[in-house]
Image (tube, rainbow, N blue to C red):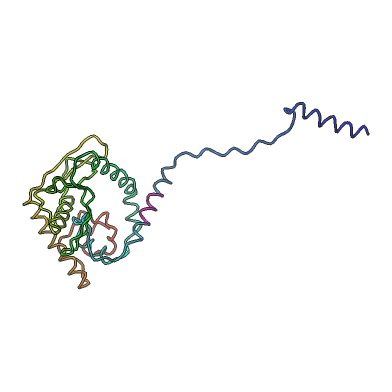
Amino acid sequence: MSEKKNILNRVVDNIQNPDQQTTQKPAQKPLEFFDSRMFYALMENQRYEELKNTKKRSYIRASEAGDCANLLVFRLRGDTPDFERAASGSRFLPLMAHVGNAIHDFIQKKYNFTGTEVSLESTQHRIHCRVDALIDNQIVVEIKTVSNAELRREKDIFQVAANFICLREHGYNIQAGQLLYIERTLTRMCTYELSAAELTEYADNLVKKIKHVFECLQSGQEASQFLAYNMCRYCEYNHKCSRRKKDAR
């Protein structure tokens, strides 16, 4: 009886003095800080997934109008790119695209454009485009986020020319073009005006380039004209291209 009484007394003491109870503390989870390597891997994986969806197509996008003709041949043919080269070389591309889209959206909503995000196709020249903005339906505007706004890029002029071709085919009376550059630091903005004559010249060259690309697709040959060797170092089809620079492997 005394033993039962002692046990009861201990239980009562524990209830009255909970600090005396022995409790096991849960294991503390270690702190996990932002891991830049993991973030790089996530963005590279996103780019990898995008590239896996490469399929054969019968048109070029206005955004690639200034690309190397041989690169266009491989893309339109649906060839498999070098995923590792393409992903590692553009690990920040998803982030840059997100920032660029936000800047586009802000400017398009703030300025009094007559049209934005105008999607068109040129069936005659096999171009698909999405025009950033139009002013009075006479000036085609291309908005770009760039590292250096003071450097006008020919690739971007070709994109405006591709938009010009599509707009003209759909009855727009385009009198001029304009490049609007916003630096990614958001500290500088530059504009470059393109006359109708300049747009027409670039458009004519683009038409010849596209014709050459589709002739190569039909014959199964690589492009021999309109090559851009400055792109070889980063090209996702470098491993397949016989036209590449010898030192750009």
Q: Main secondary structure of the magenta part?
A: helix
In the rendering, at what x and y percent does residue 85 appear?
33, 56
Q: Is residue 184 above or below residue 85?
A: above
Residue at 27 percent across and 54 percent down: it is: 234
Question: Of residues 217 and 125, which is closer to you in this image?
Answer: 125
Residue segment shown in magenta: 42-48
Q: Quadrant of residue 107?
A: top left
Quarter of the picture holding the C terminus: bottom left
Q: Is residue 224 found left or right of 104 in the rendered image?
A: left
How far across and down, in percent of the image, does residue 29 sit? 57, 39
> Residue 180's x, y, as percent?
18, 43
Residue 31 magenta-highlighted: no
125 lies above or below 148: below
Q: Residue at x 55, y 39 (%)?
A: 30
Q: Is residue 157 left or right of residue 107?
A: left
Q: Is residue 43 magenta?
A: yes
Residue situated furthest bottom in the rendering:
219
Residue 175 versus residue 2: which sits nearer the camera?
175
Question: What is the quadrant of residue 105 in the picture?
Answer: top left
Residue placed most toward the observer, 194 or 212: 194
